[in-house]
Image (cartoon, grey):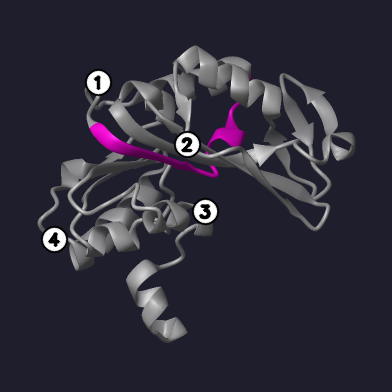
Amino acid sequence: MSSGLLYDRFGHIDIYLFDQFLRGRIVPGMRVVDMGCGTGRNLVHLLRDGYDVYATDREPEAVDAVRALARGLAPALGADHFRVEPVEQSSFADATFDVVISNAVLHFARDDAHFEAMVKEMWRVLRPGGLFFARLASSIGMADRMQPLGNSRYLMPDGSERYLVDETTLMATTRRLGGRQLDPLKTTIVQDQRCMTTWVLER
């Protein structure tokens, strides 16, 4: 398959999220929500292949972009599938989704309380046995390069300011949630500038 055809089918999907499809953990017919969806980079395959797709973002322009994407790829989905709301204040009922995606969102937490509120809300809307996929900035593998600013926020070598987790935080949060790790934590170090960790749980 050519690179153009791959893009048409999958868009700019995160490669670590794509791995969950390859493992058969996310399959057509599932109800999936991308919380903090941005403009929908991870939704092309889901919309194209018959998933029951929902998405939220606090930015109206981002949700408008996802609605436009859905009109072209999955016109049967209603506008209420795509909602303007922050992650920590979801309007969905408990245990609504088979899969919750949080891609490059949690490191925008203001502090520990905000991080916990976002995680708890995503966990609340996930059904028992469902899949929680998160990819977020961390200090794993580069802790000595991160400049602490307080409230678990750090100045990173790439010049950005982020809320950063470490392995202890993620494992403690997993225990508090009562989740089961489906994969070990996997961290990518991007040329000594930042670290991105993949955190995958079953409820």
**What are the residue bounds of the magenta stretch?**
97-111
- Residue type (three-letter) at the residue carrying disc 2: Leu
Q: Earlier in the sequence, mark 4 or mark 2?
A: 4
Distance from the alpha carbon under mark 4 to that under mark 2: 33 Å
Q: Is residue 200 magenta?
A: no
Residue 32 image position (x, y, % from top left): 28, 43
Q: Which residue is mark 3?
A: 16
Q: Which residue is mark 4?
A: 75
Q: In the structure shown, which secondary structural element does the residue marked by tag 3 occupy?
A: helix
Q: Is residue 96 above or below residue 185?
A: above
Q: Which residue is mark 2?
A: 182
Q: Is residue 107 magenta?
A: yes
Q: Earlier in the sequence, mark 2 or mark 3?
A: 3
Q: Residue at x 36, y 45 (%)?
A: 60
- Residue type (three-letter) at the residue carrying disc 1: Asp
Q: Which residue is mark 1?
A: 94
On the rendered image, what quadrant is the N terminus found in? bottom left
Distance from the alpha carbon under mark 4 to that under mark 1: 26 Å
